[in-house]
Amino acid sequence: MANLKCNVGGIQAPNPFWLASAPPTDKIYNVERAFEAGWGGVVWKTLGMDPPIVNVSSRYGAVHYNGQRLMGLNNLELITDRPLEVNLKEIKQVKKNWQDRAVVVSLMVPCEEKDWKYIMRKIEDTGCDGVELNFGCPHGMSERGMGAAVGQVPEYIEMVTHWVKDCSDLPCIVKLTPNVTDIRKAANAAKNGGGDAVSLINTINSIVSVDLDQMAPEPTIDGKGSHGGYCGPAVKPIALHMVTEIAKDPDTNNLPISAIGGISNWRDATEFMAMGASGVQVCTAAMHFGFKIVDDMIDGLNTWMDDKGYENIDDFRGMAIPNVTDYQYLNLNYDVKARIDESTCISCGLCHISCEDGSHQAIRVIKENGVKSFEVIDDNCVGCNLCMLACPVPNCITMERVDSAKEYQNWTTHPNNPMRIIEN
Amino acid sequence: MVTNIDVRSGRLSKEDITKNFADVHPPLSPGNALVESNRCYFCHDAPCVEACPTAIDIPNFIRKISTGNLKGSAKDILTQNIMGGMCARVCPTESLCEGACVRHTGENQPVRIGELQRYATDWFLETGETFFERGKSTNKRVAVIGGGPAGLSCAHKLAIFGHEVVVFESREKLSGLNEYGIAAYKTVDNFAQREVEFILNIGGIEIRNNKSLGKDFQLKNLQDEFDAVFLSIGLGNVNSLGLKGASMNGVYDAVEKISELRQSKNLADLPIGRRIVVIGGGSTAIDIAVQTKKLGAEDVTLAYRRGPKQMKATWKEIEFAQNNGVRIKYWVSPKSLHSENGHVSGIEFDCTELDSDGKTFFTGDVRFMEADVVYKAIGQLLEDDFDSEFENIKIEKGKIAVNSKLETSIPLVWAGGDCINSGEDLTVQAVEDGKQAAIAINEKLTNIK
Ligand SMILES: Cc1cc2nc3c(=O)[nH]c(=O)nc-3n(C[C@H](O)[C@H](O)[C@H](O)COP(=O)(O)OP(=O)(O)OC[C@H]3O[C@@H](n4cnc5c(N)ncnc54)[C@H](O)[C@@H]3O)c2cc1C
Ligand SMILES: Cc1cc2nc3c(=O)[nH]c(=O)nc-3n(C[C@H](O)[C@H](O)[C@H](O)COP(=O)(O)O)c2cc1C
Ligand code: SF4
């Protein structure tokens, strides 16, 4: 059995699977059931100043993809709509009952130092393990100068983080919005402000669908809609990229990361940790299937680590980062060609037509006595993978490396590059 | 004298027989397993779990297949049901988990739970690993009588608790009807024995083969050597047809013949009648009918004394039999056997109907069917005449009586499987009984100091 303990910017937990700040973490009733199910930590639903905000009814929209529900979820929900004192009391109780789990409190108050000082004093009293500064919420709060409105301006991130760190010793995670052009700037600001870790991503600005009868975006609230925050499996690639950017940037590569975005199972989580995350947070998957999914996460990660011989998360954490490089350093002489396994081919023709119409006309159809077979024209195949990706039969099309004799060459020295480095 | 009777071996070529007795449900491919596992909705408080006698956490094991966590998946299955591999092959899922699946209710297309269960357990058994460790020795000894599903399940769980187990088994091989009863095409490639090996791997289970309770030893002899006894002897007797000549040549007990078939080295050598009549309406009747058809019988008729609604075989079994060319004749009750030179040649039936109270009555019509072989598959009975000690054990509705903890009327003697009235006579129920009895035995033994 591997050791799944994690440490995110000084916050310890028995495993790296935490629930992200959202409805699953908005009250003691949920959080205690989540802990019973095995979650290693929670980030409490974002607290703000009283009086509490007011939420709309009809809050979520979704993208269902080809029969699978909730590939993407969009929400118009704000921060907690319960009074501050109620939340604080419950947080204190939870921490008392669950000392080994991470209890982190998410915060969002107006961009005033006195407000942050005020709330931090209250938070310290709960005995929680740390705070998460919600600079990410893309809707509702940014219009009031909070959430993404702070998160999109690196100077503000740095300033607020400073305020918090100046008045408290609690570990401080800065939650970033993906609705920026360069996530590294935001991460660097968090670091300069004294933040102990960053978490990302919060939700992405989105309109998921339009009701063509009401002629309004969905979810529709009395005939109108608004942009919401997008999350769920669909956003994982975006989150993974942003995490990688921060993990690999020399300015921020030592900054602990709590990865969020589309994580639904142990494998997703492990990929983020391979890209440097110290732990992960989950929202949509828990909202869709319930707290029990953590069983597979713990069990799957454990098994995988045992199989690979990793004893601790740090044994493999960040191991994929050195293999993320810039395009110009990729080996241009590496060459692969499609190979079709005739014994498993079902003759659907998708490899042919995807290559024919969408790539390089490298798969020929041969029809003999009414039987179709498919043949790769090596001279035309550029090794793009499209046919393999389109083929519905697993492992029927594979890519074979064919450049055995050629030496490594990248763009920096390539003859076609007018600015190539010329060695002499 | 010319006779019409036609019973012989070699009706089909070896190749045809091999084809006919191939796996009825070939294993899912990885691609199929992925698609199928993603069809599961991961229901909360799922009806399939409730419908499984061993309460396997079905949504969880299926989710783990979808995430590529096959080991975790197999663990979820096998910790609840140590014969998860066999059950995946033989459970009538249409009346258990799959019958309860919300996608069955909603769209008549349940998730193929059985096949997914097989996918995960086959993968795991192939690794040669185990999740189970023998518990620290308690120095308590338990005798398990009968090494079928109930007995092996009980023995395995007792070993986990750290008790020493001795299994007394009257036959040559372990695993009871898994080895000697289940239809051959449901459990190919010697799976029953491979599973036995997997189960016994835990250690701490001694096997005494060819030892019959009542013949080789008595219940009372066990009390000195053992702290507790678990009876899992199945049903050793069969109902009698109650007709004159029922022991003539050509009239056979289906269970016995299936056992011969299962143990046969070369199926083509088995003598098979040209025209077969099977009497009965349960899964044993279906199994003997289909297997004789697959061995080359020309006409196989399953004769049942009531209608499809009353038949014990599931709709899927009936459909399966019909797809395999078995004719099902409802509303006929055996009246008399006809013979030629001491060998059965046909059977006469009374036609039946239901009266308004739901009772069967004879209409007065009779039917005659020619038959070279008649198989009776009209139910099994407890063998209760093998041990004088059994006079003391309470019997209820023809089976050993037990309380809610599966303890019999004799102190420190438990029972489970087909020999008690726990649920349906199914492998999965026997496994559950064995597991529950082990839990009860452990509770009792740890309280006795
Ligand atoms: C033909 C047939 C087909 C079936 N098909 C299916 C199916 O497809 N799916 C399904 O779920 N169920 C099926 N069943 C039912 C299933 O096989 C039984 O419910 C299950 O095997 C019961 O397990 P058990 O351990 O109680 O009894 P058994 O499997 O009968 O095992 C009892 C064991 O005890 C031994 N024994 C008996 N007497 C003594 C004694 N005096 N001393 C020592 N040992 C003794 C026997 O040799 C045997 O090994 C079928 C049954 C039959 C007859
Ligand atoms: C309904 C809903 C409410 C949310 N509320 C908050 C919040 O109050 N504070 C916060 O920091 N993030 C909030 N989030 C964002 C999540 O914490 C998380 O960053 C995001 O959903 C991405 O993770 P996922 O793909 O696992 O859902 C909310 C998300 C959803 C769906
Ligand atoms: S999920 Fe619960 S709160 Fe939301 S609409 Fe359904 S019943 Fe209402």
Image (cartoon, coloured by chain):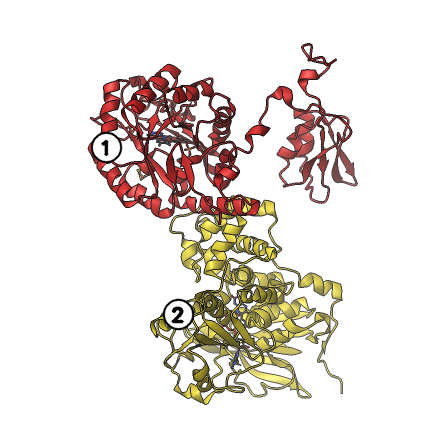
Tell me which residue sits at (69%, 74%) in the image.
Answer: B272
Residue B253: image x %, image y %? 58, 79
| Residue under label 2 | B442
Front position among marks 1 and 2: 2
How would you rate the neighbour count of disc 1 (Cα within 10 Å): few for under 14, some for 14-19, many for 20 or more? some
CA gap, disc 1 and disc 2? 50 Å
**Is B375 located above or below residue A184 in the figure?**
below
Q: Chain of mark 1?
A: A
Q: Are marks 1 and 2 in contact (CB under 8 Å)?
A: no
Q: Residue B313 in the image: x percent, y percent?
A: 51, 66
- Of residue A169 and residue B309, the one placed in the foreground of this image is A169
Q: Is residue A114 visible?
A: yes
Chain B is shown in which shade? yellow
Q: Which residue is mark 1?
A: A82
Q: Position of residue B354 (x, y in %)?
A: 44, 72
Q: Chain of mark 2?
A: B
Query: What is the display colour for chain A?
Result: red
Extreme-top residue of the structure: A418
